Image: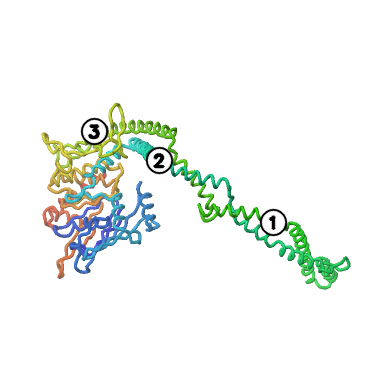
Amino acid sequence: MLEELRITGLGVIDDTTLKLTSGMNVITGETGAGKTMVVTGLGLLFGGRADAGRVRADPGRAVVEGRLRLGGPLADAITQRITEAGAEVDDDGSVLLSRTVTIEGRSRAHVGGRSMPVAMLSEVGDQVLAVHGQSDQLRLLRPAEQRASLDRFAGPEHEKLLETYREAFARWRAVVEDLADRRRNARARSQEADLLKLGLDEISRVDPQPGEEEELRAEVQRLEHAEGLRVAAATAAQALAGGAESTEDIPDATQLLGTARRTLEAQAAVDQSLVDLAARLEEAATLIGDVSSELSAYLMSLDADPARLEQIYERRAALRGLTRKYADDIDGVIAWATNARDRLAVLDSSDELLDELDRERQRLAAQVGEFAARLTTARAEAAVRFAEAVSVELAGLAMPHARVEVAVIARTPGKDEPTVAHDGAELPVGPDGADEVELRLLAHPGAPSLPLQKGASGGELSRVMLAIEVVFAGAGGPETLVFDEVDSGVGGTAAVEIGKRLARLARKHQVLVVTHLPQVAAFADRHLVVAKDTGGAITTSGVRIVEETERARELSRMLAGLPDSDLGIAHAEELLAVAGREKRG
């Protein structure tokens, strides 16, 4: 939900902060005080079009900041998207959003302390906020949103069926495209496969091994310098054995170290520090003995075999032939061969494989047709329930004779769009099934059934949207709902009914309502008043929270324009008491 909204330099608002609650937040104020700027600020914060004409000349830029606390079923997805973009979510699960618009029309956006494209604000806003007002591009007027909303209303079992359909549709389209590509590019695929097979045959004949280049390079060095290595090893061995003139009477290095060790040990009783030195001499003697043995083994292993050297030269030449053609080194050649084998499987255009793919295509097409038909049936059943529920709500919103219909109609196939056969008919299908969903309004008995955007006036459309949102409450969708003067042209009992329905929505959603009706404002969990200050050279507005007696005075002003009227205040208090009982009930 949106916890806080700060607006600076926008329209008549100089600098104000709105502290919002999780229930129903009502915003009231005199005409021209700037209530609409609150909704405008929300639109900017969530990626709406920037209008430089609304930016105050001083300070020359408008800034809207909001703290959004992520919660509900969409929290994880939004958090992941934000962090992937490089922003940070605070430890308490909230994220700071901001939008700046200059008087020249330049716009900047920030999410979680990081500069972001404005489109990121729009992406977040589409998931967390829905704005309803007479001048807004209403979310539910989009056909895709109408279908998605009906699917949510239909319930979890329907959504599982929809997910199953989408998986089958994706598999079917993948097989169709794969089969078409193999048929369309059979010759090119065959030529590419032949080239890959030639390369694999050549690599297979050489049979390179991982790390073989380094091993051969080291062996060549030993063979090419065998004599020098032999002389060095022999000289070292002789030195350890007592020198070139050594005889049985001349002790070798190991014997000399043994003599030194024993001499020290003989005096260890006199000075204990000699014990450590004697032990180190023993270690040295052991090490020299090991080196002497290894030198002897090394001398025996040295081989200046010219035939072996020639074999290595030939092997390295064969490996260099592979690295010239396929990769920079042998490991790269081996990787090329692995990739080539995988690619050959993809390039296979044999008749056997094509027949197998065609059978799979037909099987999946039948599956898609079956699931699509089941979706249509489920949507038609849900459409009846939904239309009845919305029509009941409209009866209490000063539209007693209006009815909403939900038409589930077959998709209009576009050029080259896919179809599947089902029950002897061709169904045009897409990722969401074979249906289009259209909300229609019958404004009164005898009136034609028209799409919402054509069949309803501005005030009627806002109330229809409110009725729909009440029915959808708890069926998913955005957590924060904004209603901008949806009560226009309504009064009396209908106004109270609007207040009841908004309060009902606020049980499961955060609701922000801009209203001029005291009957609606009385249902607020938090009442915010936009007040205009004309004391200075420039008119400005600010927002404050009103409670208890101040709230009754504001409702009295809304009722009769007399905030200090005893009769008005008494009427306001009665309204508050009625609203309180309704909310508790």
Tag 2 or tag 1, which sits nearer the N-term? 2
**Circle 2 residues within 10 Å: few <14, some 14–19, many ≥20:** few
**Circle 1 residues within 10 Å: few <14, some 14–19, many ≥20:** few
Residue 521 in sight from this viewpoint:
no
Q: Are marks 1 and 2 in contact (CB under 8 Å)?
A: no
Say which amino acid is labelled 2: Arg
Is residue 69 toward the left or the right of residue 331 in the image? left
Is residue 164 toward the left or the right of residue 485 in the image? right
The nearer-to-camera label among 2 and 3 is 2
Residue pictured at 19% horizontal, 43% vertical: 464
Q: Which residue is mark 3?
A: 384
Say which amino acid is labelled 1: Pro
Residue 279, image quadrant: bottom right
Q: Which residue is mark 1?
A: 306
Residue 238, image quadrant: bottom right
Residue pictured at 29% horizontal, 52% vertical: 125
Picture coordinates of residue 469, whole percent (x, y): 24, 43
Q: Are marks 2 and 3 in contact (CB under 8 Å)?
A: no
Say which amino acid is labelled 3: Val
Is residue 232 toward the left or the right of residue 328 in the image? right
- Please state which of residues 528 and 165 is positioned toward the viewer in this rendering: 165
Residue pictured at 15% horizontal, 54% vertical: 556
Find the residue positioned furthest to the right: 249
Picture coordinates of residue 34, whole percent (x, y): 18, 59
The nearer-to-camera label among 1 and 3 is 1
> Label 3's element?
helix
Residue 285, image quadrant: bottom right
Q: Which residue is mark 2?
A: 187
